[in-house]
Image: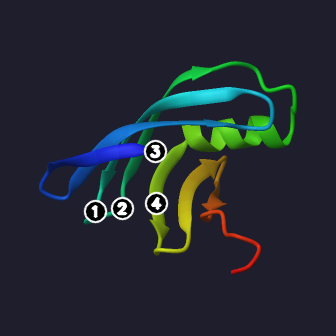
Amino acid sequence: MEGAALDGSNSGGTFSGRATSVNTSGEWNANGENRELRLTIKNTGNDSDVYLGKAFIEGLKSAFKYGGDDKNLYIYYHEGATTKFISFAPQRNSGN
């Protein structure tokens, strides 16, 4: 994930990663005041994992807000009338 401050409380950049069996990339824009998040998925195929992989990509496509701290990032998305989130944490060495 790469990014920079755009203006005021807005930041944006690019991201790339891998779901379960497909690579994905795109752009992100975030507002630091209201924590609004917009992700634009630019490159993704069909994940062969029809449950976890598909849910992950659909969650990113439906992202509307973020939260967290220096140890966790939460990306909130809507699935029907339900609000869900994807949680990310940095990799840690096994000795930590």
- Residue at the farthest front position: 95
The three-letter code of the residue at mark 3 reads Met
- Residue at the farthest bottom position: 96
CB of mark 2 within 8 Å of CB of mark 1?
Answer: yes
The structure residue drawn at horizontal position 46% and vertical position 75%, both measured from the top left corner, is: 69
Q: Position of residue 57 (x, y in %)?
A: 66, 36
Packing grade of label 1 (10 A; few <14, some 14-19, many >=20) is some
Numbered-mark total? 4
The three-letter code of the residue at mark 1 reads Gly
| Separation (CA) of disc 4 from disc 3 | 15 Å
The residue labelled by disc 1 is 32
CB of mark 2 within 8 Å of CB of mark 4?
Answer: yes
> Which mark is on residue 1?
3
The residue labelled by disc 4 is 66
Q: Is 71 situated left or right of 13 in this image?
A: right
> Which mark is on residue 35?
2
| Separation (CA) of disc 2 from disc 4 | 6 Å
| Separation (CA) of disc 1 from disc 3 | 17 Å
As rendered, which of 11 and 95 lies closer to the eye?
95
Sequence order check, earlier mark of 1 and 3? 3
Packing grade of label 3 (10 A; few <14, some 14-19, many >=20) is few
